Amino acid sequence: MSGIKKWGIFCGSAVVGILICLTIAILLAENPETYPKKTAKIDPPKQEEEEKTEPKIIKIAVRFVKPEPKKDQQEPKKKTTVKKVKVDTKDKEQKKTAAKPKQVKQKKGKAPAELAYKQDKKLKAKGRKAIGLHGEKMDSFPEISLEYSKSISTMQYIRSMEQIGGVFGVVNMRTDTLVALIDYKGRQLKSRVRLPGMSPKARYIQGDPAVRPFINMTEKLRGPGKYCVVLLLPMSVDHYIAGAVKDALTKSGLKTGDVASISGSYRLSGGTLSMSLRRLELKNGKDKPINFKLRLGA
């Protein structure tokens, strides 16, 4: 009997224990906050890792930069060598104490002798070789610029040029075309006609108020534009001028290829117009005085 009692007590205590456990489980299920729940600790992510994943704000600065050549296109740097020169102190002292040489005034040389010319067949033939039969080599000849306002009047210049076959006209500077001829006596414009035997070289007349009325007439007929009054000479006159200038340069020890430009003025003597050439500019930049006189009239 004692064994059965012990077994009964054990079973009873086990049942009581099970009921207690069930009661505690039910209570925990209904109120989970009564007992703290154990959770694993998770370290927050480090700030450095967050910064790596978040996009950065990029500020763009605008600059004007010259493009650099590629490495294979870059020129090799040139080495500059500096030579060291020893200077004796004795030489320096001697230079300081040495007396300055006296400046000797150079005497001015005599004016070049006058080389005078008038129209003839030999000079015209020489001019044809220099500038071509129709002036096709005119660009290779030195430029000649002359003024007349200080020596003769505008009407004297016009009459003298007309006496040797010169023609005055109006040129459209934008198209390099002759648009009208000028009748100075009638103070009017004439329609452009064929001008056989004339030189392609045009002498532009600028700064003379006497030509302004003819430019105004042209603007009324053809509309506004860039116009200029020019002088056209016969080809034979330009052949003579080129031949005389070439001969005078040869006698002065110069070649036409060495000369950039020639300047001077028109002179009227005894009713005859002449070209007085007094200075030339060489292509090396130097000036040289000359005294060439070319008679244009008969």
Image: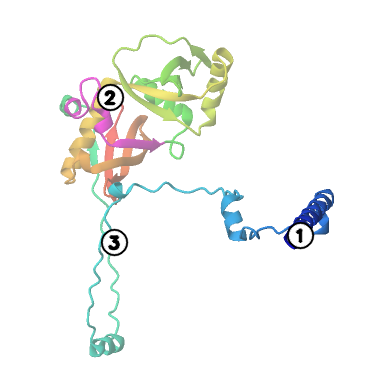
Q: Nearer the viewer, residue 127 or 7?
A: 7
Q: Earlier in the sequence, mark 3 or mark 2?
A: 3
Check disc 2 and give the amino acid type.
Val
Q: Secondary structure at mark 3?
A: loop
Q: How is the image coloured?
A: rainbow
Residue named by callout 1: 1
- Residue 22 in the image: above or below residue 100: above
Check disc 1 and give the amino acid type.
Met
Q: Residue 221, located in which quarter of the rendered image? A: top right
Instruction: Please state which of the two labelled residues, at mark 3 or mark 1, is closer to the viewer.
Output: 1
The CA distance from mark 3 to mark 1 is 167 Å
Q: Is residue 131 magenta?
A: yes
* x and y, in percent, of residue 227 in the image: 50, 23
Whether residues under marks 2 and 1 lie with C-beta atoms below 8 angstroms apart, the answer is no
Seen in the image, is 144 located left or right of residue 4? left
Of the numbered discs in the image, which one, if any, rests on residue 237? 2
The CA distance from mark 2 to mark 1 is 169 Å
Residue named by callout 3: 108
Segment colored magenta: 127-147
Q: Earlier in the sequence, mark 2 or mark 1?
A: 1
The CA distance from mark 3 to mark 2 is 36 Å
Q: Secondary structure at mark 2?
A: helix
* x and y, in percent, of residue 234 in the image: 30, 20
